[in-house]
Structure formats: C-alpha cells, structure tokens
Amino acid sequence: MQSPAAEKTIAQNVPTICHNYVNEDTTPGLARMAFMRPMQCFVTEILLGVTPAEASVATDAVSTAYHAIMRRGEVKKKETVFLFGLGGLGFNALQILLYIGARVIISDIRQDLLDEAKHLGIPSSDIVPVETFPQDFILENGLSGKIDTVLDFVGTHQTFEDAQHIDSVRRGGKLLCIGSLDTENTIHMKIGTRKRLSFIFSYGAQVEDLKQVLDLIAAGHIRPRVETRNIPEFEQVLEELVEGKIKSRVALLHE
C-alpha cells in the first residue's frame, strides 16, 4: 500500500527521492518495508574523465561533503576551517576546501590519513599530531579565535566536545555537524550563547550538488578515495569493513 502522497521535499525548494511503502506480509516481524523510487529529474550524465567507481561515490561521499561545505556551511575562500575526520567523507571534504582556497587545520587519529593530507599540500604546521589534543594544538600555534568554521565529519562525543571547547572558534563562528557516530551529543549552552555560535546540521545533497561534484572530478580537482572490487568479493569486503581494513569506500564492479 502506497502512502497517500509521496513526499517531495525535505525543506523549502529542496527536491528529494520519493518514498513509497509496501506491505510485506511474507517477512516475519516486518509489517511495512520502505523502498525508493528514483525521480527522473535525478538522472545525471556522467562526464568523460569520471570512472564508474568515482561516479558511484560521488552520489554520496563527495556530494554530501560538498553540500555541507558549500550550501550549509557556506565556507568561503581565505577562511580558516578546523576539520575533524579524514574518512570517506572527510577526505573528500578536504579536497573541496582546498579547491575553494580555505586554510584547513586537520585532526584525525590515523597517521596514514594525515600523511595523505600532507601529500595533498597541507603543511605540517596545520596538521594536529595524533597524540596531541586539539585544544593544546590551538594554543601552541596561536589559533585562538581564528577559526571561522569547525567541520565535524566524525560526530563522536569526543569530537563534538572538542569542537565546542577549543578556543579557536571566533565569536559568531559556525560548528557544522555531518558525522553521527554517536547519535546523541551535548550542546553546551553557555559556550554557544556567549560566543554566539551557529550549530548547523547537514545531511545528503541536492542534484545540483552532484552535477558540480562530477564537474570537479572530471576537471581533476577532486579524486575520490575509492577501491574497486568484483561483485563476488562482496562477503570478503564486508569482513574487511568489520576489521577496519577499508579506508574509505569500495565500489563493486562486474568483471
């Protein structure tokens, strides 16, 4: 049974995918199951220079980061940004920020990802060492009150606490929340009100974001981190994901 009207917006003038529902009486314990029906307006051409694997992650890991930075956070050139997390979304976010021309201060618990960021051109002076607390790094490097926006692509209790407590965020600055590894976090009211901070949440992207992302990939400004494997390797990929061996995204392709 379909819903009376498929929802077409998640916010004013923001198109999304139509949600439909079907009764599934043959599935024990499941009375209702949601499925997705793509709308024709979401069909987008894949440009030359974009591989199928890159196109697959562009719809999620890259477009989500782009939407958060460009539309929700409205990060501008020459601004200074503190970036928590260089995972599947965060590393793409880093490339987008570099394309914009923003200065990026990076924090991650994995040294190999910090090394990759350095290869992209991030100076060592803008990378928080793995064993260093972000607050200490801010004070030691004279960054107090100089961060325009904090981007949290992790969303754990620790990163959300650090994002609020680091003295780096200027008055009137922004905390942009994308990651949600912990589904509940605490907003410290006195910190937010005294500094007049804006807490901004972002999820997903719009079709125009995807088009822009594909253009940037085709032009070589963004190189999504994606591994390619064959479809029969699906179970092995899942095991590696559980074991923490997958660095970012995996695209399963036909042989």
Image (cartoon, grey):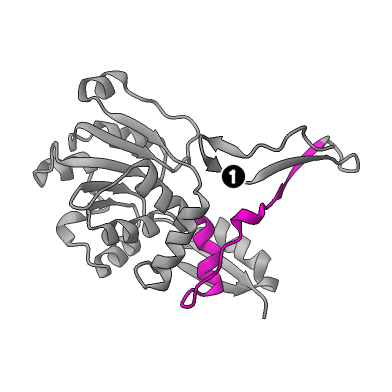
Q: Residue furthest right?
A: 26
Q: Is residue 108 visible?
A: yes
Q: Residue furthest bottom?
A: 255
> Range of the magenta residues?
32-61
Three-letter code for the amino acid on which mark 1 is drawn: Thr
On the image, the x and y values in percent for residue 91 come to 37, 59
Residue 198 relative to residue 153: left or right: left
Write down the residue under mark 1. 16
State the residue at coordinates (21%, 25%): 195
Using the image, determine if residue 23 lies above or below residue 207.
above
State the residue at coordinates (48%, 54%): 208
On the image, the x and y values in percent for residue 107 come to 28, 50
Q: Is residue 169 magenta?
A: no
Front residue of 121/46: it is 46
Using a 10 Å C-alpha cutoff, classify the residue at mark 1 as few (fewer than 14 neighbours), some (14 to 19) or many (20 or more). Answer: some
Using the image, determine if residue 125 lies above or below residue 184.
below
Residue 207 relative to residue 142: left or right: right
State the residue at coordinates (42%, 56%): 87
Q: Is residue 44 magenta?
A: yes
